[in-house]
């Protein structure tokens, strides 16, 4: 999938022109935060995680959050295993560094981690390693077709 396809997807909400494409890379939380001049925690990173029963899940978390194995196991019944870059591309249609939580294949289930709730707006990627959009949390939930809020991450090192 491409930024153009993400723009087309966001057009139904009138947000297609709000996608920002920068000259510099935003492929990591640190790079994205520096490029935007915001704290890293406001970058909404997409974590692609394999499940034993089914294709996997995509969890959107704040940039300073880390996956908590026990919390994930308690919620999903399996230990988390991050997808490889090739698996993530096949699963979402996006390359690592630009994985977008919306415009995904219908079988991809998206969950929003509670770590995001500290912010009014966050910045998810839009399909490339240099694109993003600023969204309010209700918009992120709607556009991503979120299955709901989960607490599977922890803050800090």
Image (cartoon, rainbow, N blue to C red):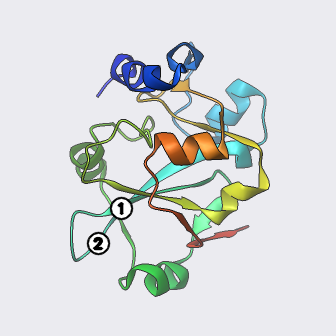
Residue at 40% from the left image edge and 79% from the top image edge: 76
Q: Position of residue 140 (x, y in %)?
A: 56, 43
Q: Position of residue 27 (x, y in %)?
A: 51, 34
Determine whether 142 is above or below 21 in the image. Answer: below
Nearest the camera: 111 or 87? 111
What number is the disc on residue 151? Answer: none
Q: Secondary structure at mark 2?
A: loop
Q: Residues within 10 Å of mark 2 (few under 14, many from 20)?
A: some
Q: Residue at x 72, y 26 (%)?
A: 36
Number of other residues with Cα within 10 Å of mark 1, as a class: few under 14, some 14 to 19, many 20 or more: many
In this view, the residue in front, 93 or 130, is 93
- Residue marked by disc 1: 57
- Quarter holding the N terminus? top left
Between the C-alphas of marks 1 and 2, the distance is 7 Å
User: With 136 as the anchor, is 91 left or right in this view?
Assistant: left
- The answer to whether the residue labelled 1 contacts the one labelled 2, judged by CB atoms less than 8 Å apart, is yes
The residue that appears at 78% across and 34% down in the rendered structure is 38
Quarter occupied by the C terminus: bottom right
State left or right for residue 54 relative to residue 156: left
Within the image, what quadrant is residue 5 found in?
A: top left
In the image, residue 144 sits, relative to residue 151, either above or below, namely above
The image quarter in which residue 82 lies: bottom left
Q: Earlier in the sequence, mark 1 or mark 2?
A: 2
Q: Number of marks in the image?
A: 2
Dot 1 falls on a residue whose secondary structure is strand
Residue at position x 60%, y 65% from top? 66
Q: Is residue 66 left or right of residue 127?
A: right
**At which x and y percent is residue 150?**
55, 69
Mark sitting on residue 51: 2
x and y percent of residue 29 in the render? 61, 42
Q: Is residue 48 left or right of residue 70?
A: left
Indicate whether 135 appears above or below 13: below
């Amino acid at each position: 999938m491409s930024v153009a396809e993400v723009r087309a997807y966001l057009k139904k909400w009138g947000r297609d022109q709000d996608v920002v494409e920068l000259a510099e890379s935003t492929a990591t939380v640190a790079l994205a935060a520096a490029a935007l001049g915001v704290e890293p925690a406001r970058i909404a990173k997409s974590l692609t995680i394999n499940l034993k029963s089914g294709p996997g899940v995509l969890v959107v978390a704040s940039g300073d959050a880390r996956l908590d194995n026990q919390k994930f196991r308690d919620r999903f019944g399996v230990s988390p295993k991050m997808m490889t870059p090739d698996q993530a591309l096949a699963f979402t249609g996006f390359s690592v560094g630009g994985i977008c939580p919306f415009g995904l294949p219908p079988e991809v289930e998206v969950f929003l981690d509670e770590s995001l709730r500290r912010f009014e707006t966050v910045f998810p990627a839009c399909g490339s390693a240099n694109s993003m959009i600023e969204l309010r949390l209700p918009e992120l939930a709607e556009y991503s077709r979120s299955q709901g809020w989960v607490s599977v991450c922890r803050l800090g090192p």
